[in-house]
Structures are given as C-alpha cells and as structure tokens.
Amino acid sequence: MSQFRIAPSLLSADFARLGEEVRNVIAAGADIIHFDVMDNHYVPNLTIGPLVCEAIRPHTTAPIDVHLMVTPVDALAASFAKAGADIITFHPEASHHIDRTLGLIKDAGCKAGLVLNPATSLSHLDHVMDKLDMILLMSVNPGFGGQKFIPQTLDKVRAVRQRIDEYTAKYGGEIWLEVDGGVKVDNIAEIAAAGADTFVAGSAIYGQPDYKAVIDAMRAELAK
Ligand code: DX5
Ligand code: ZN
C-alpha cells in the first residue's frame, strides 16, 4: 500500500475551538478531517450537524469525511453535501434504499461510502461496489470516542481488502478502506497490515497535547 491517510476525529477535539482544532491537526500532518454525526436515535449520543460543517469548511482545504450515524439518512446527506463535505458515509441499516442514498450523495458531488458495524455483514457490499468510493469498517460499536479496538475487526479488514482488490483489478477505480474506533500508535501497523489504508483516530490524537508527535509516531509505525 503506497498511500496511508490519517483522519483525526473531531469528536475528541475541543468543541469550543473547532476551527483551530481543524487547522492544528492538519498542520500536524493529518490528511483528512473525520466528522462524526450522531443523532441520539441511530446511536445514543448527539453531536454536530451541517451548520458546524459549514463553519469549519473555510478552515482547511483537506477533505472533510462525514460519518453519518443517523436515521433517516437522505435529507442530512444532502445538507452535508451543501455544507462542504467531500466524503459522506452512512450505515446501510439506517437507509431504506441504500442504492438511492449512495446515488444522491454522488449526484451531489461527494464521494460516497458505507459503514459496517462490528457485527454487520459484508453482504451489504454485494450489489453496490460500483457506487463506493470508501468502505468504513467500525472497530468499535458506534456512538462514543475512546473505546477499545475490537480485534475481530482485523479478519473483516482482510476480507474487505480482498474484495476491493478483486473488484478494482476487474473494473478499475479506487475504493478506500477506512477503519474507525480504538486506532492507536500501538495497533495502527497491524491494522494496515490487514489491508486498511485510511485510519480514523480521535482520542489517540486529540487526547494528547502534541498532535504532531502522535501523527509522526503513527506514520513511523506505518512505514515499518
Ligand atoms: C465512534 C466514532 C469514531 C470515534 C473514534 O462512533 O465513529 O469516529 O470518534 O474515536 P476513538 O479514536 O477515540 O476510538
Ligand atoms: Zn467515525
């Protein structure tokens, strides 16, 4: 894998200084801003919406990766596209019409992806590979930062890596494989070895005073 992307999750940032937190983490070497949207319905927590996405948009040119943990999905996905999101992912069980939701995200000019929870089957990927720019595998149950990485995720990462490689070898294109939850300096190499190329890290980065030191340490692990 030639390119690894590090995506700090704003969930663990200081919400009173979000613009600055976005700028600081990108200046520290991050590639993508991961933006967790929780609705107190699909998950038992409540975070930030399209207005906050719009507010942080001028603070960076880095892609904003919106992870929707909401139901229903479609209207909010459209609002986030207008608010400046670059990538929008959602959980298949939160949408009645997965193909339609993926299509509306792409028609709005964003990259689209599906998010699979630790116990969600890979079969959700079967008939939509052509519409996916990203597959996000949850390595914790969604809803909160700071949880422990579920090790069984590694098998799933390997299986999805194989699917992506087979699909892109046959049809071309590119599909990113992102892992979210409990990613730290001490497990990122193992997750990369299983086949992930994009790493969400919330508490591991924002929980430390020196963001650059953490991101440099992650890159050093990825270069091993
Ligand atoms: C959890 C969120 C994650 C979370 C990760 O539902 O989707 O993006 O912020 O936090 P850490 O890296 O602390 O596990
Ligand atoms: Zn997330």
Image (cartoon, grey):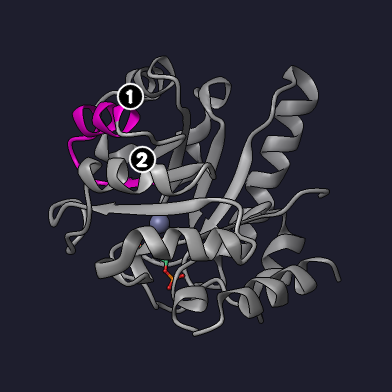
**Outermost residue toward the left in this view:** 41
Q: Viewer-proximal residue, 116 or 108?
A: 108
Q: Is label 2 in a helix, a strand or a loop? A: strand
Residue beneath label 2, please?
A: 90
Q: Please check the rendered image and state whether residue 4 is part of the magenta-colored stretch, yes or no.
A: no
Residue found 30% across the figure and 69% down from its top:
144
Q: Amino acid at mark 1?
A: Thr
User: Of residues 106 and 44, which is closer to you in this image?
Assistant: 106
Is residue 200 in sight in this rendering?
no
Residue 108 percent coordinates (x, y) = 38, 19
Q: Earlier in the sequence, mark 2 or mark 1?
A: 2
Residue 27 sits in quarter? bottom right
Query: With respect to residue 108, does 134 lie above or below?
Result: below
Name which residue type carries label 2: Phe
- Describe residue 27's horizontal placement relative to residue 114 as left or right: right
> Which residue in the structure is indicated by mark 1?
101
Q: Is residue 199 left or right of residue 116?
A: right
Q: CA distance from mark 2 to mark 1?
A: 9 Å
The residue depicted at 21 percent of the width and 58 percent of the height is 47
* Residue situated in front as seen by the camera: 27 or 41: 27
Picture coordinates of residue 32, whole percent (x, y): 54, 50
Q: Are marks 2 and 1 in contact (CB under 8 Å)?
A: yes
Work out which residue is located at the far top of the displayed protein and give it. Answer: 107
The relative height of residue 119 versus residue 73 in the rendered view (above or below) is: below
Q: Position of residue 199 (x, y in %)?
A: 59, 59
Q: Which mark is residue 194?
A: none
Residue at image x 68%, y 52%?
A: 197
| Magenta residues (range) | 66-82
Q: Which quarter of the figure has residue 101?
A: top left
